[in-house]
Image: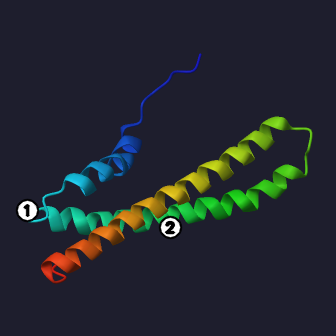
Amino acid sequence: MMKLSFNWFNLILLFPCFYFFYWIDNADRNSKIFPIFYYFYWIYISLLALFSLDMTIFSFLFFPFVLNHESDASSWGVGLLLIVLSLGSDWLDYIFFKKMFRLRQELGKSKGGRH
C-alpha cells in the first residue's frame, strides 16, 4: 500500500507564488522591508520563468516521442498534461511580470525611481 506523504519543501517553494497576489495589492510601499520583497520577487519570478520555459521546451520535445506509440492512451495523457501545465505556468509568469512592471511604473512615478 502506498503511503501518502507531504513534502514541505514543495510548499516552501510555492508559498511566494501564493503570497505574491496579496503582497502586490496590500504592500506598504514606505516600509523598510518593501525593497527586500520587491527585489526578492524580481529574482524569484525570473527563476520561475526560466524553469517554466525549460518545462515548456521539454514538454514540446517530449510529446513527439509519445506520438510514436498511438495505442498507449496513458502516455498521451501524460504528454498533454505536461503541455497544459507548462503553458499554464507560462501564463502565470506573464501575470507576475505584468503586475511587477505595473508596480515598477508606479514606483517610478511616485518616488522618482527609488526602488
Query: From mark 2 to mark 1, how far is it between C-alphas?
Result: 30 Å
| Secondary structure of residue under mark 2 | helix
Specify whether residue 115 is in view.
no
In the image, which disc is placed on residue 50? 2
Which residue is depicted at the point 12% across and 62% down?
Answer: 33
On the picture, is 74 further left or further right than 30? right
Specify whether residue 95 is in view.
yes
In the image, which disc is placed on residue 31? 1
Inspect the image, locate mark 2, and give the three-letter code of the amino acid beneath it.
Leu
Which residue is depicted at the point 33% across and 45% down?
Answer: 12
Looking at the rendered image, the disc whose residue lies closer to the viewer, 2 or 1, is 1
On the picture, is 7 further left or further right than 32? right
On the picture, is 66 further left or further right than 87? right
Split into 4 quadrants, where in the image is the C terminus? bottom left
Residue 45, image quadrant: bottom left
Q: Give how far across and how far down residue 91 sits, in percent.
A: 53, 58
| Secondary structure of residue under mark 1 | loop
Split into 4 quadrants, where in the image is the N terminus? top right
On the picture, is 60 further left or further right than 103? right
Residue 62, image quadrant: bottom right
